[in-house]
Amino acid sequence: MLRERVKHPLAALVVAVLVTAPWVGVELAGGPDTLGLSEPVTVAVSGVAVLGASFLLAWGAETAEKDVPRAFAIAVLAVLAVAPEYAVDALYAWTAGTNAGTARGIEAGNLAVANMTGANRILIGLGWSGIAMFTVYRSRTTADAAVEHRSGFLTSAVQLDRNISTEIAFLLAATAYAFFVPLGEGIGILDTVVLVGLYVAYIGIVIRGDVEAPDHQVGVPKYLQGLRQLVRVAAVLVLFAYSGAMIFTAVHPFAHGLEAIGEQAGVPPFFMIQWIAPLASESPELIVVAYLVNKARSTAGFNALISSKLNQWTLLIGTLAVVYSIGLGEVGSLPFDEKQTAEIWITAAQSAFALAILANFSISLREATALLVLFVSQVVVEFAIIQTVADAAVETELSIFVLHAYTVVYLVLAAGLFWRRRESLVRLLQRTNRSIQSAYGSGRPEPEAGD
């Protein structure tokens, strides 16, 4: 009897809540600074809280699939998982607005863009590639039906859900627009209207989708889905609210602790803010997706990754101008320098290449490796420049050259793939069009040949 009780799904739920309890205590006591916690201790306590909250968030999203369209549940999960990234960027944008025209304001504006582009590139360069590799690896024991094992070097691939065509199409539109953002005087209200408008339109489509029968669930989601609807919905809301609060409050100290440790090790502060802080902010999303893949739910995992990229590439950029304008006290555009212009372009180019890979609803180990190698090599090269070039002007010039070079590489690869997969791209857009018509009552999507 005791053994059965230990295996009860609520036991896992309790454990996940308990691992967040130390962080709750720290927050109630006034925070790490009030308690005098060292950076390693802060990183450990907040990091464990993020881990526990990520599981709670995943269980909430899986449970919600019984009552709302799966795409909408995943979209909520994606927003909550990357909420800390929004807060970090909002802080920099606010600082830039309240100190407009000063050195501090200019630096804050550049940091806002650097943090945003770093987060977006990490999500694809490490997230999409790493999860694809992990999915193929785990399929050896999970028998994941989404994985197609092929003969040849790095040819095995993960097949994606074709219902994700709407997300890919909207992400493609946001990516195309992003190339024009640096051509203005900064990130302005027009950018907000276009990018946030794209996301609102996307949510308007997916929320009208059909509620599908949930996948075979086990553990906590299975138990919660068996509850009465009123109790189940309340449980989902509590899980979302609690996990969101934990992630929102714990990720910042987690990131700052890592930054402090990195600075002590000699890593430049700007580099830390662009790469280490966003990596910490993205950790809840990556933990959730890894959890889904581990349950052989790689389709839902990739849907979450793509949804996260869409909301970061639209809402995150779009809200920067709003926060900046509030800090400024009038409508304005968040300014940034030439280097951040190059950062936006390489981020858009990387996104275009990644979308070209997904145009046929598949990502192979070879393609995942290409995403990973391109991302890591660019970061390593830029870090080497920062560490070895003493002259700041020369360092910036070399960094911009590297960014432009990688942008060209990404765009050439993207153009080649889009051309080879042009028929798949057309079918993807046609499928998206049918989804839009269905959502707004113009008809029902019909099965596509080959789907």
Image (tube, rainbow, N blue to C red):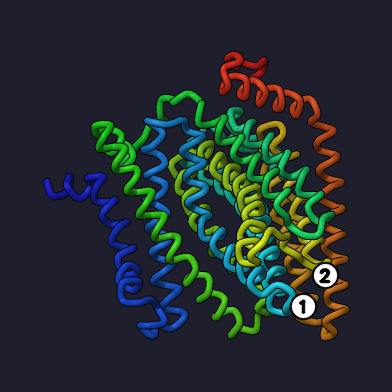
Q: Nearer the viewer, residue 101 or 114?
A: 101
Q: Decide: is 75 above or below 337.
A: above
What amino acid type is highlighted by mark number 1? Answer: Ile
In the displayed structure image, the side of residue 300 where residue 388 appears, left or right: right
Q: Residue at x 61, y 23 (%)?
A: 435
Q: Which residue is mark 1?
A: 386
> What residue occupies the far front of the structure in this picture?
330
Which circle's residue, 1 or 2, is located before the other in the chain? Answer: 1
The answer for how far apart the CA atoms under marks 1 and 2 are is 8 Å
- Expressed as whole percent of the image width and height from the top left, the position of residue 192 reads 67, 49
Secondary structure of the residue carrying numbered label 1: helix
Residues at marks 1 and 2 touching, judged by CB atoms closer than 8 Å: yes
Q: Residue at x 55, y 80 (%)?
A: 260
Q: Which residue is mark 2?
A: 399
Q: Nearer the viewer, residue 256 or 384?
A: 256
What amino acid type is highlighted by mark number 2? Answer: Ser
